Amino acid sequence: MKVREAVDWAKGLLLTGDGDLECNKFSWTSSNVQPGEVAIIGKTNNLMDTIEDAYQKGAIGCIIEEKINLKKIKEKYPDKFLIFVKNARQAYMKLSICSRNEDFELAHKMVHEKLMQWKIPVVAITGTCGKSFTTSICGSIVNQKYKALYTKHNQNGMSGTARTVLQRKDEELIVLELGLGTKKSLNKLSCTVEPDIAAILNIGTGHIVDFGSKEALIQGKLEIFDGLKENGIAVINNDDENLRKWKENHTKKCSVITFGIEHTSDYMATDIVNTESLVQFRLIEHGKDTGLVIQLPTVGKHYVLDCLCAIAISRALQVPLEDIQPGIDKASLEPNRMHIVTKKGITIIDDTYNACLESVTVALEYLAIRKEKRKIAILGDMINLGDFSYECHQKVGEAIVKNHIDLVILVGKEVGPIAEVTTANGIPTYSFNTNEEAIAKAKKIMKKGDCVLIKASNDLQFIEIVNRLTKFLKES
């Protein structure tokens, strides 16, 4: 968090100091402050002494609710910052749950109390992949009818949920992306926000290491329904076998809306057009052709199901059909997801945000339909797979073979099974330990007419590869 962001969160005024400084930890009073933290000071008998005590203990700045001699502060502590707020205690509560030293219990309590007080509709969306895209599309569509607040920048944990909810001004509805961390984490998030509509996009392999088995992971994802209000609406992907089973056996008092392509569902896509530059489909609603041809704001057939989910939610909220495409067109999508750059006759697909088996597979399928002469995949580890790592990476290798990828560059400790499959099938494969080595190899082998997919789990920082190769092409 930057100082200026802290000012916005606390609804304060920056009296002195640099607004671009980072401030990630907050302490109540100067007596508890640690070096590098921000001291938040309530009413005190001698404010100047308290501020000086905080600064001497290593505080990088202070937040106060009383007037002070600014000239003296600036002269004595020119490298420190000072923020004025109306209520220091409330500022501390907000900042402590929206920073890196999150007070999760306080966050749960505050978010729950606010939502119960406001009594506005809440939508919760989860899934192994596609959450951010679906939340952005859904929020934008819903915003055509209501003033909608929705999760941005993948802020899908408790701290991020608090950040989203506490931004509310006069919005009439909130759409939340909820992520799955450990056992019962989604249960607590769902029970905190008590959604009126809860949706699951898919259940894949992401986070499986935290659960130990696919069965436990499935139960973890289904926890989003734990907080669903009685007589609320569950929205599920009917093409997902595990979600179909849940629909058949659930005892929750709720309506169920389905979306799908392969299995008969309430919301379906037909006449799908999937090219390297366009994805569109005809929308079927409850078995009837709506006459709408929906065009997606990105490439990749896998986004069709995510878009159907967003549409199903929007229609459950009574958004008119004619508002769907305008809402999609206005959506602001997250970066590093199927972002395409072409320079010097070489195309780079930046899909570096994250990676699991399902998302890597669909990215390879998209690479396969590209018209460039040669298809290159630069792939890295998919993390948090535990005992399932070998099998999942092996399946990536099989997907590379199936999609006729011409050349593979691998980085990481877990990618060995990919190389085993690709080399056995005669695909040129180069394995490295570092991004630097992969970049050097890519620079040597890339040539006009290539299309290069770059993808790995976010921890591998593959955005570095994208930036370096893009810069190389620009300067060469």
Image (cartoon, rainbow, N blue to C red):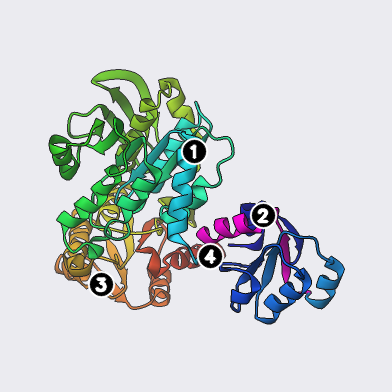
For label 1, the crowd category at 10 Å Cα-Cα, with few meaning under 14, some 14 to 19 and many 20 or more, is few
Residue 361: give x, y in percent of width and height: 25, 54
- Image-based side of 475 in relation to 154, left or right: right
Q: Which residue is mark 3?
A: 414
At 27% across and 60% down in the image, what residue appears? 207
Marking on residue 117: 1
Q: Earlier in the sequence, mark 2 or mark 3?
A: 2
Q: Which residue is mark 4?
A: 471
State whether residue 328 is above or below residue 25.
Answer: above
At 34% across and 78% down in the image, what residue appears? 433
Query: Which one is in front in this view, the residue at disc 3 or the one at disc 1?
Result: 1
Query: Which one is in front in this view, the residue at disc 3 or the one at disc 4?
Result: 3
Q: Which residue is mark 2?
A: 87
State whether residue 312 is above or below residue 38.
Answer: above
Question: What type is the residue that disc 3 sits on?
Answer: Glu
Instruction: Examine the structure image and report whether residue 196 is included in the region drawn in magenta.
Output: no
